[in-house]
Image (tube, helix red, strand yellow):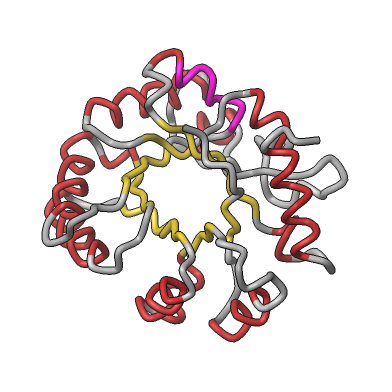
Amino acid sequence: MKEKRPIIALDFPDKAAVFNFLGQFPADEKLFVKVGMELFFKEGPQMVTELKKKNYDIFLDLKAHDIPNTVYKAMKSLAQLEINLTNVHAAGGEEMMKAALLGLSEGVKTPAKLLAVTQLTSTSEEKMQQEQLIKTSLENSVLNYAKLAQNAGLYGVVCSALEAKKIHEHTSFAFKCLTPGIRLEKNDLGDQKRVVTPRKAHELTSDFIVCGRPITQSPTPFASYLEIKNEWSALI
């Protein structure tokens, strides 16, 4: 089933900025938020603990990519934070992804769901071919990573909404696609390349969407959040 709330990317430099931003939302609005590297490396696991106390659902976006044993141990530690979603890079390979799953499952009743990053939404096909030396199409690279993640037993992938439908067709509609790079038509693209509107993401069968700057840099964050949420849910 599709997650009807957009996940808000808390791309802020510190805890004070985060809670200043979240203070602009009604206390009874149960948010789904993303904690990325900038915030986690600054504030540490305590940041996640404090957000959990506020009853928020959490996507911990650290994109682990290392040898299997290291990723296993890292995920075993992160599992104690009782997050909802986290991720690894599919480029780490099937063995690494299986090790990450094992780490998340140890010592907790409800393990976090694990996603694999395919190609970042800031990556174009030209950059992929020139810088990663992957001599195929961007679509084929993404589909290969998605099938690898499915074979490893993961919950789904992080991808562009432009690729979600093809991924579902090549895996299954139970295999989830979380799609960042979401912008309203009036928003600037920033450093993203493969972006879509919330309505288009809905049409392209995304299961989760992540939205940052259109909400976090808005003068009226809650109103912008509701606009994106309603468009994502196809309510307008």
Q: Is residue 83 magenta?
A: no
Q: Give the range drawn in magenta.
A: 161-168
Residue 167, position as x, y percentages in the image: 46, 21
Asked if residue 41 shows in the view, the reply is no
Is 165 part of what is drawn in magenta? Answer: yes
Label count reads: 0
Q: In which quarter of the image is residue 26?
A: bottom right
Farthest residue to the top: give it.
169
Viewer-proximal residue among 8 and 189: 8
Residue at image position (52%, 41%) is 3
169 left or right of 108? Answer: right
Residue 76, position as x, y percentages in the image: 17, 61
Q: Residue at x 33, y 23 (%)?
A: 147
Q: Residue furthest right?
A: 186
Question: Which of 68 and 124 lies nearest the eye of the viewer?
Answer: 68
Principal SS element in the magenta part? helix
Whether residue 188 is visible: yes
